[in-house]
Every structure is written in C-alpha cells, then in structure tokens.
Amino acid sequence: MNTFTTLDFCIFIAYAILIIVVGLYTGWSKGGKEKDSKEYFLAGNSLAWWAIGASVIASNISAEQFIGMSGSGFVIGLGIASYEFIAAASLIVVAVLFLPIFLKTQIYTMPQFLEIRYSKSVKTVMALFWLLVFIFVNLTSILYLGALAINKVVEIPIFSSIICLALFAGIYAIYGGLKAVALTDLVQVVFLIGGGLLTTYIALDYYAEGQGAYVGIQKLMMNVPEKFDMILDKSNPNYTYLPGIGVIAGGLWVSALYYFGCNQYIIQRALAGKSLAEAQLGLVFAGFLKLILPIIVVVPGIVAFALNAPIDKPDQAYPWLMHNFIPSGVRGIAFAALVAAVVSSLASMVNSITTIFTMDIYKEYLVKQKTVSEKKLVAIGRVFGVISLVIAVVIAPMLGNLEQAFQFIQEFTGFISPGALAIFIMGFFWKRAESRGALAAAIGTFIFSLTMLCFFPEVSFIDRMGYVFLLCILLIVIFGLCNKQKQSTKCIEIEARLFATTRLFKILSFIILLTLGVIYYIFW
C-alpha cells in the first residue's frame, strides 16, 4: 500500500501556507483602517461573480461529498449524482426568484429577512435555531467527518486532526471575515476541482489499463451498467434512498432550494455581490461547477466497485483509491483537495455563525446602549467565532462512527428544510402569510416529519420532505385565511421587473438545463 512521501508532504504544506497567506493578506486592513460590520460580514459588497461561485461550491463541498458520495457511488452508482444535478438547477431558481428579493431588503442575514417579512419573534426563534444547528450539528460534523477522512488517508489521530482543521480554518476566517473566506475559497476550488479530477482520471486510466479516462468510462458502462441508472426502479434495493422519478420531481427540490436559497451558510456569498447581476452570474457559475462534481465525488466510487475493492464499508472507497493508485506527488495534490473541501466549509460556517450571532442576537438583545460601534461588532463576531470553534472541537469526537453521524445529519436536515422553505416561499409570494403561520410551520415541520417517520417508515426520506413541505404550506395558508386582513402589513411589494435577468445569465442557464436534460435522457 502506498504511503505519503516527502514530496507529498511538501506539496500539502505549500498549499496550507498559500491559503493562510492569502487569507491573512486579504483580511488585513489597509492603512490601519478598522473593518466595519459590512466589510467584515458582507465583504463590503465587493465580491465578483467568480468569487461568489467559487465560494458557494467550496463552502458546499466537504468530506461528506468526497467520502460519503463516493461511498454512495460504490453502492448505488451514478443515481446519487441527482443531489448535484438538482442543485445545479435549483441555483438558477434561487438566482432568479430568491436573490432579487433578498437584495431588495438589504439584509445581512436570513433571520433579518424574517423580521422584515414576519416579526421579531419569528426572527429570534429561527436565529437561535440556526445557531444551535450550525454549531452543534453542522460545524461539529464537518470537523469530525473531515478529521475521520484525514485519518483514513494519512492515519493522523482523529482528535489531532480536529484541532488542526479548526486552527487552519479559524486563523484566516475569524481574522479576515467574509472577503478572506471568499477569496481563499477561489484557491481552494482550484485544488478541490483540479485534485479531484486528477484522482478520477488516474483511477479511470488504471481501470482502462493505461488507455485513458474515456476508455475507462466506456469499460465501466459495459461492465457495471447497473451503476449508471439515474432513475432507480422499484426493484432496485436502493430505491428507498432514491425513489425513482420522485428524485427529480419531488422532495429533493425542497432540500436543494432550502440549502442554496434560504441557508445563511451559502446565500451570504451572493448577498455580498457587487450587484444583483454579478450575484446571479456567481450562482450560475456555481451551477456549472455542480455539473462537474459527480465526476469527482461519484465516479471514483464506481471505479472502486468495478475493481472489487477489498473494503469493509463503502465510505472507504475514496481513501482506498488514494492509498493504492495515486502516485507520489499527485497524492499530495489529491490530499490537498480533500483538506481544501473541509477547511473551506469550516471557514464559511464559522463566518455565517458569527454573522447571525452578532447581527441578530448580540446587536438586538445584548447591547445596553442604543448604538454600538462598528469596531465592537467586528470584535464580538471574532470572539464568538473562537467560542463556536472551541465548542465544536470539544463535541466533535463524541459523534461516534461516520455512518451514524452522517445519517443523523441527513435526517435532521430533512426535518428543518420543508418548514423553513415554506416560510420563505410564502413570505415572498403570498401577501396574506403572517407570523403565526410562520411559527406554526417552524414547529410543524418537526411534528409532521416525526409523525411520518414513526407511522409511515416505508416512505422515502426524499418523498417525506416533499409531503411535509406541502403540509407546512397548508398551515401557513390556513393561518393567513383566518386573518381578517386581505394582506399582511409586512408583505413585500414585488413586481415583474424585479426578476429580470441579463442575456448572458439566460444563455448560461439554458446551457445548464440543456446539459441536465441530455444527462437524464442518456442515463435514464
């Protein structure tokens, strides 16, 4: 079995130094001028489309994708790529329908939008809820699963890996704010995409006995055709995870639209764009990168299956490939890609946590004086960023084994997304939606999800999200109709021209949708 060489370590160390230098330099205040809250939390609305798109993808891709989706590719095959393909389409929807409304309200955070549209109570409930989830579920799991992936590849103790990852991401994310996170993400994406594609190419070339990646793909499709079904039949043993046509026409849209459209962790990059047009181009750029990701995170798992990898668990497929087939030097690049995915997600999560706490909790409830200086807001954000990382480092080792932690994350997110998405969509487009209905949906999403899980366990996780979303919409409608007013006093006035897009955006969106159509037609 191959091991890390001096060359691999040198390549990885050079990558780590580059990220820290770029992050600290970007976050450095020129001329000694202190950052204000807008510069720290929204990069002073200075992000270009390429920075937004790269940061969205770098924030989104972590160890769960490299390890978890490769494992799903090993078991299920290309069908698991629907998570990435539906995400590409959902980014277009978010850019056209969600983003113009968010930018119109000039918000820093998602809870702020909920206060503008509904009430302070809705904002506070959701802000506290998101903070708890981001710190105790997302941040903790990213640290643990990232450390576990590193342990499988280079055998560094898990707790040591957790500390190193937290320090690596925290150094520049906490100091530099969103701009440092976004611009380092641009470098991270180069390693993530480049290193990932290189790993996939080498694996396919090996499977093709040195005849190249294209021959490798052809050979895979001929030898394991069952791994190239995008829409699973009911007879497929993995149908529960990907319930046929429901994958592209059901609950997976709920998960994708919530994650990319209502999640502070992702949408904050678009809020920091130079303009609406720039932010929309950033999201469509992210959509193009999404089309590439299955090649990086799914195909390696299929190759491992075709090679009859002697592994105990499917999630060992990607580390097995790296150990056995990636040559010295390239292994350092591939490992840098894996760490880049983890660190960029950590940095983005920390930045979002500090933004919500500072703007929605501290500024609203913990400040005694009526006004607070910009310097104090930035300082509070940095302090809370440190606190959140320390909490995550302490809790991360308690998560147990990878499979249990990953399933817990998926189930928990599936409880949140239907209600949250319903609250936002109805707040956008139904003038009678009001705060009691929003609070009912926030509570109802858990009650409905638990009820279906207990009494209808045979219903797929993906289908369940779709059903719960419709029930939450119904709750909001009922409360809205019970209100004597024909429209909420806090409804947002929107008009058709708000959703206008540039010709370039339309062309690029059409190319993405056409590509998706061709993929599903070929691999139906």
Image: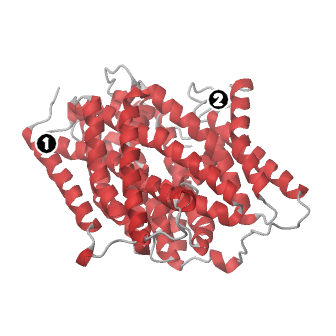
131 shown above or below 148: below
Q: Position of residue 341 (x, y in %)?
A: 34, 47
Mark 2: few/some/many CA within 10 Å (<14, 14-19, 20+): few
Q: Secondary structure at mark 2?
A: loop
Three-letter amino acid code of the residue under disc 1 = Asp
Query: Label 1 to label 2, Cα distance in Å?
Result: 45 Å
Q: Which residue is mark 1?
A: 8
Which mark is in front, 1 or 2? Answer: 1
Q: Residue at x 78, y 59 (%)?
A: 434
The colour scheme used here is secondary structure
Quadrant occupied by the N terminus: top left
Q: Position of residue 169 (x, y in %)?
A: 30, 50
Mark 1: few/some/many CA within 10 Å (<14, 14-19, 20+): many
Q: Which residue is mark 2?
A: 234
Instruction: Place residue 291 in its image quadrant.
Output: bottom left
Q: Is residue 61 visible?
A: yes
Q: Position of residue 463 (x, y in %)?
A: 67, 38
* Left or right, residue 433 beside residue 406: right
447 shown above or below 105: above
Q: In this rendered view, identify the residue nearer to me: 42 or 94.
A: 42
Three-letter amino acid code of the residue under disc 2 = Lys
Residue with the most extreme front position: 368
* Left or right, residue 276 beside residue 299: right
Q: In this rendered view, identify the residue nearer to me: 353 or 138.
A: 353
Q: Residue at x 33, y 21 (%)?
A: 311
Mark nearer the N terminus (1 vs 2): 1
* Left or right, residue 520 beside residue 472: left
